[in-house]
Image (tube, coloured by chain):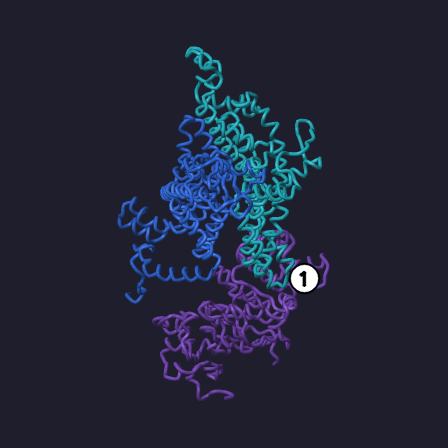
Amino acid sequence: MTALLEVENLRVELPTRRGTLVAVDDVSFSIAPGEVLGIVGESGAGKSVTGAAIIGLLEPPLRVAGGRVVLGGRRIDNLPYDEMRRVRGKEIGAIFQDPLTSLNPLYTIGRQLTETIRTHLDVGAATARERALALLGEVGIAGAAQRLGHYPHQFSGGMRQRVVIALALAANPRLIIADEPTTALDVSIQAQIIALLKRLGREHGTAIMLVTHDMGVIAETAHRVAVMYAGRIVELGPVRDIVDAPQHPYTKGLMDSIPRIGGVRGRLRQIDGAMPRLTEIPPGCPFNPRCPQVFDRCRRDRPELMRAGRGEAACWLFAEERVGA
Amino acid sequence: MTAFVIRRVFQSVLVLVAVALTAFALFNYVGDPINNMVGQDTTPAERVALRHELGLDQSFLIQFARFVGHAAEGNFGLSYQQARPVGQIILEKMPATLELSFVAALVALVFGVPMGIYTGLHRRSWVSQAMLTGSLVGISLPTFLIGILLILIFAVVLGWLPSFGRGQVVHIGWWTTGLLTASGWRAIILPAVTLALFQMTLIMRLVRAEMIEVLRADYIKFARARGLSNRAINFGHALKNTLVPVITVTGIQLGAIIAFAVVTETVFQWPGMGLMFIQAVTFADIPVMAAYLVLVGFFFVVINLIVDLLYYVVDPRLRIEREHAAGG
Amino acid sequence: MADLVAPVSSPGPAASPAARQGCVRRFLASDILYSFRRSPVTVAASVVAALIILGAVFAPWVAPHNPYDLASVSLMDATDPPAWLDGGNWDYPLGTDNQGRDVLSTMLYGTRLSLAVGVSAVLAALLLGVALGLIAGWKGGFTETVIMRVADVQLSFPAILIALLIDGAARGILPRDVQAEIAIYVLIVAIASSHWVYFARTVRGSVLVERNKEYIQAARVIGVRPMKIVVAHLLPNVIGPVLVLATINLAVAIITEATLSFLGVGLPPTQPSLGTLIRVGNDYLMSGDWWISIFPGIWLALLILSVNLFGDWLRDAFNPKLR
């Protein structure tokens, strides 16, 4: 299986006057064509920054300080601005958290759609309009012909997110990075949007990188999951294994804190303490101050991802099974 | 749409009434009209008779209504200082002020907006830094000081441009214009630049601030993620979103230009309403002050109304919601 | 059941943010000091402002002459150029004006008056504006409508026009012989009444936000008198932006004073502020005696620029939503 997207040793830094902070630290993963990879973690874990780094839209002063991003065999992290611009939208679509603010309030959605289509595809106005109509139909917006002439504020939140998805799909990209696409929406609408994303990904063969803090969304949607903590991937594996048999103590804690229907009844457990701020990441394993199974080595050496169960975990508990050492 | 316009017109009328009340209070209570009309040797009985004749013994509301009625006809009584009808004096002075304000506003916009866009887009370039520093100096120099410096350089030292007056004017009906003669154009350069400089720096700083703010918005980030060109993002998406606040402030600044014409006209002895007003203030010529107040208030209200209506053209959110409300 | 209650470690709800600023303030101060030292322009501006202000405050000791002492002024020395030009001498480093007064000395004394008017006007505007803003925000209803409507109407006119109008009205009411003496108070009232609006609007905006916060609600619930809530709890939490606004307004007030004096409706030539000096000198500009108006002009511009730069930095450092 050749990967569509390969991220290798990605490092994102945030220079401040008190020294350089590391927002994303040595992160590697890959996404196969048509695959849905979930990236899960608490806010501040570096998930969104990872997504932004891949599409080259880090907000300064955040900057990529190391690693490579390869899309379909082509390195894209060092492209000049204008070439990267052509990758965005054309090969990688993006969906952001807040559909209310993702659309320009002063233009009709028809204009925003055709503008995107004509930026990337060499088509005339009429063809672009047809494609816009088709896209709106595909994302489930009724009366598309009439809706093209409407402004964003005339749509509900869920409908706007559908428009945003249509915009991300406009040039038929191979990968969509969806950054918390349902967080700002009502619960009932969340399910619809997730179902839509899944269906579209399947129909178009589009890979999806789904960034969220919602383990429930991941469990329903993703094929594989990467769990992030303090800027690093702590566990990576198939979704069923991570949900049913998490390996890393942090993932275990995360799973124990989610209520389940029909599960063993008992108190929900919580992980003591909070994720460290970027300024206070401890040496060794970043999770060591909160880890119930902590031992000496965790405070000293930093664990890499190593084989654990059917996936990988960055935890010294699995040291003897270490792969490729 | 109509409901909004009606509400705005109503508010404008309120402002005008407030202005008229102030002017009326000035007119009636600050300067006693009787004292200014009669000599020292008038008997109290004659004063009372005159008071009655002029209707000054009537109730406040009636007097106010008559004041407003007269004001609407352009009748503000006689100037204490010049003993001529105030309406006539104002009509003579108005073209000079409006011409100056118009040219200054044009200069401020034509230079201020592009400079604001440039400095907003290229925040770190040294040209932007220089413009910003320059604008701070521009804001810190009081208008009259700029005028004096310009006179010193261009009139006294270089001798290129005249330092006072309007130059040769041409009469078109009751309107006089200096924009049809070479000497008129030479005369308007220094005052117009003086008047424009402060507004220009203000507009530039505002456009810059709005550009920077809008460029941080989610829809701009999303537009980038869609791979749109910088040109489309900066000038299509960002600029249009900065327009609403820019229009507001430009409208207010247009009012400020008319007000600051008072200062510029004094420096350059420009024969307009501003100079007239200052002379009126110096001599406590109340009818002229009241008339100027009402007239300027009227200008401001009209400008504000136009600004509000312009929002409709720019911002669909206002337009459509009303239609919906009306439709269903 | 006790398990269900989340442990509450936050301080009592009645503790207002301002009350527990002790440690916060130290942290803030260090940050602000840092950003101050990091900005050479701000440091330079503060030094210039400090020099100008010190020169004004200590004018009687610093100035080479006393321009109010008519005995020491001689028309023989009128319109002498600055010392380094032909015909100048070091008795009058920056030359003399049309009455033979030393330009440097009149400048230092004039700055005193400019600053006195500017500071008093801003203080008066601040007191009035904060009081009305607190009342409007706290009372709401009809009181608020009236206050904010007046503010709106006034705001649709440039401050300078309002000040001119008040000034003009005062001239109409007051007898002419006292006008020169009380000109300074008229000026302060005129400028203050044209500037209170900005303070009132800022304070009202903050009050509307703060009044719904928990510490205010809590204070109400435990029965603190409204007057005490407003003064002891609300005021300290809305005053920050006001102080920044005051700095920026000081520059505007000084400009307004100078402009009014320049227009001849501010301070009289017997009591000249910087604006008056420039007005007087302006009449001699065409005859080439530029120093009478230009030196006070530069001095005024430096003062305003340095206050503006300081205010700009202050606004960015505290970064309240002010514009």
User: In the rendered view, would you say B65 is above or below C2?
Assistant: above
Task: Name the quadrant containing residue C194.
Answer: top left
User: In the rendered view, would you say B215 is above or below B60?
Assistant: below
User: In the image shown, does C94 or B40 lie closer to the viewer?
Assistant: C94
Task: Name the quadrant containing residue C2.
Answer: bottom left
Q: Position of residue B32 (x, y in %)?
A: 45, 21
Label 1 crowd (10 A; few <14 / some 14-19 / many >=20):
many
Q: Which residue is mark 1?
A: A119
User: In the rendered view, would you say A247 is above or below B181?
Assistant: below
Query: Residue at (57%, 54%) from the top-left corner?
Result: B211
Chain B as rendered: colour: cyan
User: In the image shown, does A287 or C169 lie closer to the viewer?
Assistant: C169
In which quadrant will I find the N terminus of chain C?
bottom left
Task: Name the quadrant containing residue B325.
Answer: top right
Chain C as rendered: colour: blue
Q: Helix, strand or loop at disc 1?
A: helix
Chain coloured purple: which letter?
A
